[in-house]
Image (tube, rainbow, N blue to C red):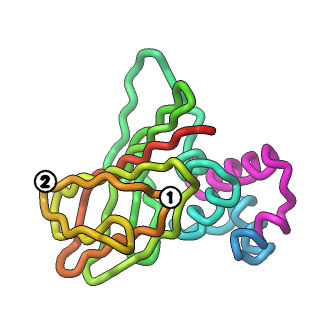
Amino acid sequence: MEMVKLVGLNLRAARAHRGLSLSEVARRAELGKGTLSELEAGQRNPTLETLYALATVLDVPLGQLLATEADAPVETGLVVRRAGAAELSGQAVDVQLVDRTVSGGRTLEIYRIHVRAGNRYVSPAHRPRVIEQLLVHSGTLVTGPESTPETLGPGDYIRFDGGTDHVYAAPDDDVSGTLVMRYVDE
């Protein structure tokens, strides 16, 4: 299924599950009601920032808005994600959901991440109890809590609380890495 249609279906389902009106979700996410309606109808491509805002309002992991039925947990089996599959782009950061596992009150999401050279993005805090882990493959990345970011190079790893505002910046070259987000369901 085309990503824009999939995201629309998942948004509508998450909103219905929370029992929130289109107007209320749009207001809380600081979006126009028409924009949210177009997103839910699969008629508009969302940005990474828009989906993070909606995931926060709906109190769901970002990957839940990107997941397909094929992402449902399986005891055994083979899952293959091809490079170049649909990415979600933002102002400075692009991500691609690689895998999503939900088990025992925990959700684990693995993303390919790309930060474009010369860009800086401050991600607003996610819901509480979200841990971000990032392994840099190439480039120099400034990341971590906005108040105390770290500079990382290829092979460097960081883990931090995603429940606070945090930064992703690529001061010189494009950065590629693997981002793991761990959610503890309450």
Q: Is residue 36 in the magenta section?
A: no
**Res. 34 mark:** none
User: CA–CA distance between discs 1 and 2?
Assistant: 25 Å
- Give the number of callouts: 2
In terms of image quadrants, where is residue 46? bottom right
Residue pointed to by mark 2: 155
SS class, disc 2: loop
Q: Is residue 15 in the magenta section?
A: yes
**From the image, which quarter does the C terminus lie in?**
top right
* Magenta part of the chain: 1-26
Q: Nearer the viewer, residue 137 or 186?
A: 186
Relative image position of residue 174 (x, y in whole percent): 22, 72
Quick one: label 1 or label 2, which is nearer the N terminus?
2
Please identify the dominant SS of the magenta region: helix
Residue under the image location 71 percent in, 75 percent down: 31
Instruction: Name the amino acid type tagged 2.
Output: Gly
Residue 159 in the figure: left or right of residue 56: left
Residue pointed to by mark 1: 163
Mark 2 closeness class: few <14, some 14–19, many ≥20 residues within 10 Å: few
Instruction: Name the amino acid type tagged 1.
Output: Gly
